[in-house]
Image: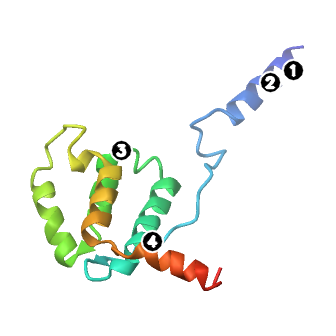
């Protein structure tokens, strides 16, 4: 009976959480950083946002807050979009949850409003009507 107890103790230690020497954590494949978004490339905004969101979903332990998502996303903004984000970054200590820096959905909405393709819906409908899908 004592040998069984010892064996169970050894098995328990072998699978104990946090023991990195015996069990490896699941790792997701490395992902490339999104391409920088230039404000003049309105047709690439959706792709830029999707690239950012894929990274956030793949590394939830790193991008666990909207603030971290905002900081990562804005680091890839250039041109007018980069200039537009500067005032928010200079007020980085603002903890208000309604502040753009703390609300990633609000950031996406603002980017689409300011730098998105104003004819995106019309183009998609035309594309669909022409039988391309």
Is disc 1 in contact with disc 3, using a CB cutoff of under 8 Å? no
Q: Could you say whether the residue bearing mark 2 is in a helix, strand or loop? A: helix
Q: For the residues carrying marks 2 and 4, which lies nearer the camera in this image?
A: 4
Counting residues from the start of the chain, the first of labels 1 and 3 encountered is: 1
Is disc 2 in contact with disc 1, using a CB cutoff of under 8 Å? yes
For the point 32% across and 60% down, the residue is: 72
Q: For the residues carrying marks 4 and 1, which lies nearer the camera in this image?
A: 4
Q: Is residue 44 above or below residue 84?
A: below
Task: Please provide percent x and percent y for residue 91.
Answer: 10, 50
Question: In this figure, which residue is indicated by the disc labeled 2?
Answer: 8
* Quadrant of residue 46 within the rendered picture: bottom left
For the point 36% across and 44% down, the residue is: 65
* Apparent side of residue 17 relative to residue 72 in the rendered image (left or right): right
Q: For the residues carrying marks 2 and 3, which lies nearer the camera in this image?
A: 3
Task: Please provide percent x and percent y for residue 43.
Answer: 39, 80
Counting residues from the start of the chain, the first of labels 4 and 1 encountered is: 1
Residue 125 visible at all = yes
Disc assigned to residue 4: 1
Name the outermost residue toward the right: 1
Q: Is residue 40 above or below residue 81?
A: below
Label 1 packing within 10 angstroms: few (<14), some (14-19), many (20+): few
Question: In this figure, which residue is indicated by the disc labeled 4?
Answer: 121
Q: Cα distance, mark 2 to mark 3?
A: 40 Å
* Apparent side of residue 69 relative to residue 94 in the rendered image (left or right): right
Q: For the residues carrying marks 1 and 3, which lies nearer the camera in this image?
A: 3
Question: In this figure, which residue is indicated by the disc labeled 3?
Answer: 65
* Quadrant of residue 79 within the rendered picture: bottom left
Q: Cα distance, mark 3 to mark 4?
A: 30 Å
């Amino acid at each position: 009976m004592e040998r069984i107890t010892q064996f169970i103790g050894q098995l328990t230690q072998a699978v104990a959480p946090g023991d990195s020497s015996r069990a490896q954590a699941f790792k997701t494949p490395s992902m490339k950083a999104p391409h920088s978004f230039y404000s003049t490339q309105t047709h690439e905004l959706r792709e830029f946002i999707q690239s950012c969101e894929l990274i956030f979903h793949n590394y939830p332990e790193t991008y666990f807050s909207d603030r971290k998502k905002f900081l990562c996303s804005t680091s890839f903004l250039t041109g007018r979009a980069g200039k537009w984000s500067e005032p928010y970054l200079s007020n980085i200590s603002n903890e208000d949850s309604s502040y753009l820096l703390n609300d990633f959905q609000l950031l996406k909405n603002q980017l689409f409003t300011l730098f998105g393709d104003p004819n995106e819906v019309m183009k998609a409908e035309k594309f669909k009507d022409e039988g391309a899908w």
